[in-house]
Image: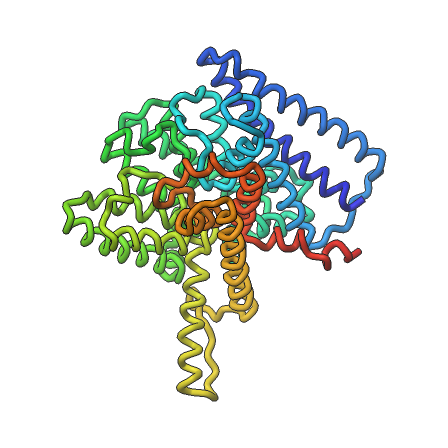
């Protein structure tokens, strides 16, 4: 019965996702794309039928009883939901006829929902607007997380809501804005929607068409990287729009709980937060280094800042050809790919807070060499950090690089050179999307099974590994 309930939750999450199909369906009607209508109403009908079947079976099996779910079950629900979600999201792409095979459509869906931003499309400007809108929506939905929205809207998940929010939220720990989890999820999504709306308005003021403004707002707040133009943000040639996107990428890569605290006037919590200070310090130092490097070669410093923010927040937008920049600027941006945004943000990567804690732990290890009998603890935000968090971060970082090396070997087996193979493995596991040397054109030549494998890697990176390893754990499936 427990596994049926897990399946039922996944189907209900897909039902919520299916409601978002109504927007590209309306776009297809508005722009006269009648040949694209089936891409959206067919998946909608399929999910509606599945929901009806699952509801009827559930009514006969459960008879009003609810299974006893454990904390580990939250990880299974989230991982399973993301697999179902990426498979379901690929249906409109596959039906559109603009993707060469089903694995390519799955890749595009996984890249969208995980906010990676890599694409199988060679020319996005030739794609119907309804399909483009679905691409943008996958970024926006995956940014904050469909499970978080489910927890916010459906009390049926309240029994394990925090476990699922924790399983999907990036970072060592999931923060509660308020004591109860459902209001916390609602506040997060309300803040997310508000920032998206504000970004869209400002981009429109900057001269973008309404469709492009909305699409790029979805990608910016979701820290995705999909765009309606082949040249990304560079095609608009608008310094105002670039500054708007820089600011909102910074916000999207920042801890949403701290953004809410600042709106409440609790600025001290933001100022004293260890991760917040490290986040802005890293960006400041990296920008200064890139500015010096570009200044010597006559490059645009604003473009340097844009790419630094775009990389550390794992957004993947581009306004210039960074492959043509001096080596110092390229290396600096490359290092940003290993850092990632803040915990509790829509950004991917390892996360700043983990680097802060490991840095402090390294300092403590050096102190122990000098004072062998000394007792040292890590202080985070002015408070001692739990040893369990330090151990968990060490385990996470090891698993992260283990998966990175494995992906490197798998991709290299396709015949790509060392640099391209490592670059692809890094940008997919970290959900970065934009790399060096033009990676998107390499994806189309990969074998079908590698496209599916990379899609799985993107999901693993988005869920920060643990949900996947719990799913694969023998201990979980043997427990009652």
Q: Is residue 436 left or right of residue 50?
A: left
All told, the count of numbered labels is 0
Left or right placement of residue 472 versus residue 440 in this view? right
In depth, the one of 426 and 39 nearer the eye is: 426
Q: Please tell me which residue is depicted at 67% across the width and 51% down the height of the picture.
A: 471
Relative image position of residue 332 (x, y in whole percent): 30, 55
The residue lying toward the viewer, choosing from 448 and 226, is 448
Side of 224 where 45 appears, left or right: right
Q: Is residue 104 visible?
A: yes
Q: Extreme front residue here?
A: 415
Name the quadrant of the N terminus: top right
Q: Residue at x 63, y 41 (%)?
A: 81
**In the image, residue 226 lies at what x, y percent?**
41, 34
Image coords of residue 347 (percent x, y): 44, 47
Q: Quadrant location of residue 6?
A: top right
Instruction: Decide if residue 346 is in sight here.
Output: no
């Amino acid at each position: 019965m427990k596994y049926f309930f897990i399946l039922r939750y996944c189907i209900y999450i897909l039902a919520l996702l299916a409601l978002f199909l109504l927007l590209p369906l309306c776009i297809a009607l508005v722009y006269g794309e009648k040949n694209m209508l089936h891409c959206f109403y067919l998946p909608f009908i399929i999910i509606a039928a599945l929901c009806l079947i699952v509801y009827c079976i559930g009514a006969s099996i459960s008879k009003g009883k609810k299974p006893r779910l454990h904390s580990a079950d939250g990880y299974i629900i989230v991982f399973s939901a993301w697999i179902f979600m990426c498979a379901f999201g690929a249906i409109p792409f596959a039906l559109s006829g603009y993707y060469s095979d089903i694995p390519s459509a799955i890749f595009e869906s996984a890249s969208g929902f995980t906010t990676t931003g890599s694409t199988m499309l060679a020319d996005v400007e030739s794609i119907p607007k309804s399909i483009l809108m679905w691409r943008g929506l996958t970024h926006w939905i995956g940014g904050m997380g469909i499970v978080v929205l489910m927890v916010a809207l459906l009390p049926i998940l309240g029994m394990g809501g925090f476990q699922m929010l924790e399983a999907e939220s990036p970072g060592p720990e999931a923060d509660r804005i308020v004591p109860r989890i459902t209001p916390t999820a609602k506040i997060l999504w309300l803040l997310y929607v508000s920032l998206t709306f504000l970004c869209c308005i400002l981009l429109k003021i900057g001269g973008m068409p309404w469709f492009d403004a909305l699409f790029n707002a979805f990608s910016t707040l979701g820290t995705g990287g999909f765009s309606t133009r082949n040249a990304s943000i560079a095609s608009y040639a608008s310094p105002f729009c670039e500054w708007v996107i820089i600011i909102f990428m910074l916000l999207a890569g920042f801890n949403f709980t701290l953004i809410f605290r600042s709106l409440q006037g609790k600025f001290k919590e933001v100022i004293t937060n260890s991760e917040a200070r490290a986040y802005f310090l890293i960006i400041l130092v990296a920008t200064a280094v890139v500015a010096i490097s570009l200044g010597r070669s006559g490059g645009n410093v604003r473009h340097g800042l844009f790419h630094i923010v775009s990389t550390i927040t794992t957004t993947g937008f581009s306004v210039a050809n960074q492959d043509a920049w001096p080596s110092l600027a390229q290396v600096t941006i490359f290092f940003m790919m290993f850092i990632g945004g803040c915990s509790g943000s829509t950004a991917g990567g390892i996360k700043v807070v983990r680097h802060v804690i490991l840095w402090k732990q390294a300092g403590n290890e050096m102190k122990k060499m000098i004072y062998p009998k000394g007792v040292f603890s890590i202080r985070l935000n002015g408070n001692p950090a739990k040893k369990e968090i330090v151990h968990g971060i060490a385990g996470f970082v090891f698993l992260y690089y283990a998966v990175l090396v494995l992906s490197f070997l798998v991709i290299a087996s396709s015949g790509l050179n060392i640099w391209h193979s490592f670059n692809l493995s890094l940008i997919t596991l970290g959900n970065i999307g934009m790399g060096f040397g033009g990676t998107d054109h390499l994806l189309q030549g990969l074998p079908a099974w590698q496209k599916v494998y990379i899609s799985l890697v993107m999901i693993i990176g988005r869920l920060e590994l643990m949900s996947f390893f719990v799913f694969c754990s023998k201990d979980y499936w043997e427990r009652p």
